[in-house]
Image (cartoon, helix red, strand yellow):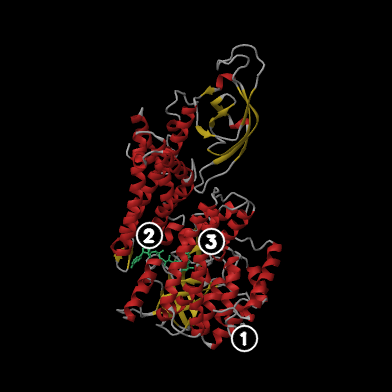
Amino acid sequence: MTETNDTRKLRGEVRDFLAEERARGTVLGRPDSWLTGWDPDFSRRLAGRGWVGMALPPRYGGGGRGFAARVVVIEELLAAGAPVSAHWVADRQAGPSILAHGTEEQRQRFLPAIAAGRCFFSIGMSEQEAGSDLANVRTRAERVPGGWRLTGTKKWTGGAHVNDYAIVLARTGEHEDRHQGLSQFIVDLRAPGVRTEPIHLLTGEHTFNWFHLDGVEVPDDMLLGQEGDGWKQVTGELAFERSGPERYLSTFPLLVSLTRELRRGAATPDQQARLGALLARISAIRQLSLGVADALDAGRPADVRAALVKDLGTRLEGDLVHEVRRILPRTADTGATPGSYPHHLAYALLHSPGYTLRGGTNEILRGIITRGLERQS
Amino acid sequence: MTTTLATRVAALCEAGRLAGPGPFAETVLGHLDVVLPEGPSTVAIADGLSLAYAHPAVTRVGPIGTSGQDAALRVSGTLPRVPYGATSTVLVLTEGPRGPVLFPVDPARATAVPGTNLAGEPRDTLQLHDYAVAADDVRPLTPAELAEAGLRAALARAALIAGAAERCVELTARHTTTRVQFGRPLSHFQAVKQEEARLIEESALVRAAVDAAARELSPVGVAAAKAQASASVAEIARIAHQLHGAIGFTQLSELRFATTRLWSWRDEDGDESHWTALLGRAALAADDVWALLAV
Ligand SMILES: Cc1cc2nc3c(=O)[nH]c(=O)nc-3n(C[C@H](O)[C@H](O)[C@H](O)COP(=O)(O)OP(=O)(O)OC[C@H]3O[C@@H](n4cnc5c(N)ncnc54)[C@H](O)[C@@H]3O)c2cc1C
């Protein structure tokens, strides 16, 4: 992606907006704010500026601006540590997915609400026995008059306790090839038979849930895409999910916090060089990531490049935390003043297990990268 | 004496494995013939306190043998992040006006600001405002005794790290042999095996350095052990978490008891920068760098 006058203008607007939000006290520069920064009012104000559902067509209430513009906004929000988790999945995944696979009725119903920051989604893919092996999902959808009955338990479902809908991957048919017979459903999280149970992070934070579906009735018109196409649809989503700025910027706010701290005194040449080395790496990964966004905009396949960005980027997210600690040793402390360097250091560190797992683990991604190599040769 | 140290260090490794505190104070003070006070006690090796004699003009000969004063002290300043500091007798080791001293602090007579480390272990900050220490409670130390306490504290912490690292290996091995994905235990996959091997290596490295330092206490040995223990933490916790998958990131798994301790303990009693700098200085001061390692 090359910066144009348009993207520069957009960046400027987002930065002004963020400055206002900082003054309100909503943007605290916290690391990993796309996982735990849940602030529906912030999401709505962002949507008010046209920055949610930006890539959706205007006839569905979207901005019609393409992925590149969306990336500009996302980069700015993540680097600032803005609380974007409420609308995150709706904006990144559910919106594009409903646009691509949904019926006209589904598009009209959900897309304008998503773009308005009034409809929040969860991802209901993983289960106890279906982590990396996603095709192993056991949640069943049985035909009933007028629709489907869903039974099973999803695990690690982020935000299921606070969001409006989940896109649930369920088995609709038995096949020898496990990748067949899977379908996606839009499930109302307030429907009878839906029950969520918290799974607390090691920090005590609540974002994950057990998401029980005890015979939840889902009307026919909430099947997303074609029956049996679930696997194809899910893997299609993953290119979007894998290559975005959130795959290398989750801990960038800690770097911001570090530089603020270093500016108070005189940084040693060693500190300067180490800080510079981190920036060099982030900058290179960013270019790779932007290349994927361009490919997606142009409709070119990008699954291997996306996997590569995610492996490099998420490893950097973790390495950055340890390197920042080396550059400026302070006791990481969740009890420190919120917004302070020791506080950011603590959360960036305590969230580090997640970076290289979510959205497909790095081991699985490396498999995709080397299989891509085999395809080429 | 050295066997006692090795035994205590082994006990601390076990405590680290079980995520408990272990005989920390006993190990740090093992070279001094002090009787630990009744009830829980903890150690703080402090700098930055200000100490003054309480009775500089008393004319009798005081217990420390200096004429014209007794050993009673007035102490002000901060003891930062003392383990269990708000609920234990704190045995403070520090520089006094006439050389190093050891004295107990009762947290009830100080201002305690409770805090925790990343594992939730109490790390309480104590503010002393003109805190009075009776003459009988002041134990003078030689500079060598104070220095040795610092080494013992670092070694004790490194031993806790070694134990927690072993716990990471245990839990990860258990998880990868029981968790099935794609119809096979995780331990079947090459990528998992490779990472698990690195985890085992890194943990063995720490334990070897700790055991060696415990056999023959020396500044270089302890510096090498604590530096390596602290430096290995990132990789040990990273691999253990990665191989656990999402469950390790949550309270559904015990792994956090080990890894959050590792992330905190690497900073406590001197982080790797502190101890590697000491090693570097020792190397520069030595005639023969190799002889520094192979004594
Ligand atoms: C922060 C976070 C947020 C998440 N949010 C959601 C959500 O909202 N909705 C949802 O559905 N899911 C969510 N997940 C779940 C996520 O998709 C899974 O954690 C991920 O797919 C891995 O599954 P697992 O945790 O069961 O690990 P496992 O699959 O059990 O893997 C454990 C380890 O084994 C390795 N491994 C497994 N199979 C192989 C293999 N064949 N070859 C080599 N190595 C292998 C893995 O790489 C990993 O290191 C989230 C996870 C995290 C950490």
Q: Is residue A134 visible?
A: yes
Foreground: disc 3 or disc 2: 3
- Residue A58 marker: 1
Closer to the camera in the image, A320 or B112: A320
Q: Pinpoint the chain carrying mark 3.
A: A
Q: Residue drawn at (55%, 22%), measured in percent from left and top?
A: B138
Mark 2 — residue?
A: B243
Q: Quadrant of the N terminus of chain A?
A: bottom right
- Relative to A79, say whether A274 is above or below: above
Give the x, y percent position of residue A211.
48, 66
Marks 3 and 2 belong to one chain: no
- What residue did someone put label 3 on? A276
Find ligand 1 in the image and state its quadrant.
Answer: bottom left
Question: Based on the displayed image, in which of its 4 quarters is residue B238 positioned?
Answer: bottom left
Could you confirm whether marks 1 and 3 are on the same chain? yes
How many neighbours does mark 1 have within 10 angstroms: few (below 14), some (14-19), or many (20 or more)?
some
Disc 1 to disc 3, C-alpha distance: 41 Å
Q: Position of residue A115 (x, y in %)?
A: 61, 78
Is residue B109 found left or right of A232 in the rendered image? Answer: right
Residue B257's spot in the image, x, y percent?
A: 44, 49
Question: Which amino acid type corresponds to the residue marked 2 in the rendered image?
Answer: Leu
Under 8 Å from ligand 1: the CB of mark 2? yes
Same chain for the residues under marks 2 and 1 in the image: no
Tell me the residue at 60%/35% (across/down): B48
Q: Label 1 lies in what chain?
A: A
Residue A350 seen anywhere in this rendered image of the structure: no
Q: Are marks 3 and 2 in contact (CB under 8 Å)?
A: no
Query: In the displayed structure, would residue A150 be above or below residue A327?
Result: below
